[in-house]
Image: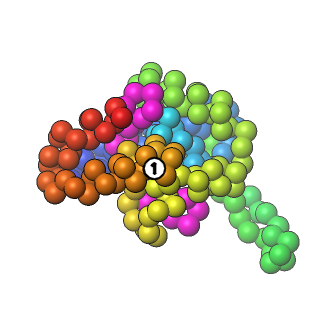
Amino acid sequence: MSMVQNRFAKQKNILKELILEILNENKQPIQKVKLAKLVLFAEIGHFLRTGESITNLYFVRLKQGPVIAFFDEVLSVGENKEWKKESTPIFIVEKRENRFMSIYSPCHDAKLPEKAKETIKEVLKKYGKKTGTELSLISHTLPAWKNSEPNEPIYLTELVKTKEADYFALTDIIEEIDDTKELEKNISPILSRT
């Protein structure tokens, strides 16, 4: 396994634990879109509280909002081991047909640091009663989503910027730096504190 594959394997495992903790803390099954958005807001909330990401993964700009990388893969791999997936039919009036909604419930407890668990409690207190659609609409207000192209990676440092001016100031700084290693080593920790 290469270093990159090994790094992503560790990050996917942390994402699995993050999803599992959200499912456990929520106490009720969660629909897939809502679960994806709760992961987004957990990462944003944790970054704002601690200056760190829980998973160290990037997000992808999709039509329904930013979604963490490997979300579908981790959900699929975790079925019947980490969580149970049930499909519930929903009648779509406009199309006069049933569609199926996936909902998830945990199979066991998660292994996450206490700081991350505290963040998840705060996020569920703030967003837990909202629907997946409502959370998607909130995610569409983020400047990083509004100003990116379909399937483009979006980084947590960008997603925490809620004002257009702050977002563009950040992207201007990043574009001026040519050296990726320099950005990772020296600039990213500084940006996380701004």
190 vs 180, left or right, is right
Quadrant in the picture for the C terminus: top left
Q: Position of residue 21 (x, y in %)?
A: 53, 34
- Is residue 2 part of the magenta span, yes or no? no
Residue at 65% from the left image edge and 38% from the top image edge:
127
Please state which amino acid type lies under the numbered disc 1.
Ala
- Is residue 68 part of the magenta span, yes or no? yes
Residue at 37% from the left image edge and 49% from the top image edge:
169
Whether residue 136 is visible to the viewer of this picture, yes or no, is yes
Q: Position of residue 164 (x, y in %)?
A: 49, 52
Q: Quadrant of residue 89?
A: bottom right
Q: Nearer the viewer, residue 191 or 135?
A: 191
Secondary element at tag 1: helix
Residue at 44% from the left image edge and 64% from the top image edge:
148
Q: Mark 1 Cα within 10 Å, few/some/many (few <14, many 20+)? A: few
The magenta-colored residue range is 46-69
Residue at the bottom extreme of this rendering: 95
Q: Which residue is mark 1?
A: 165
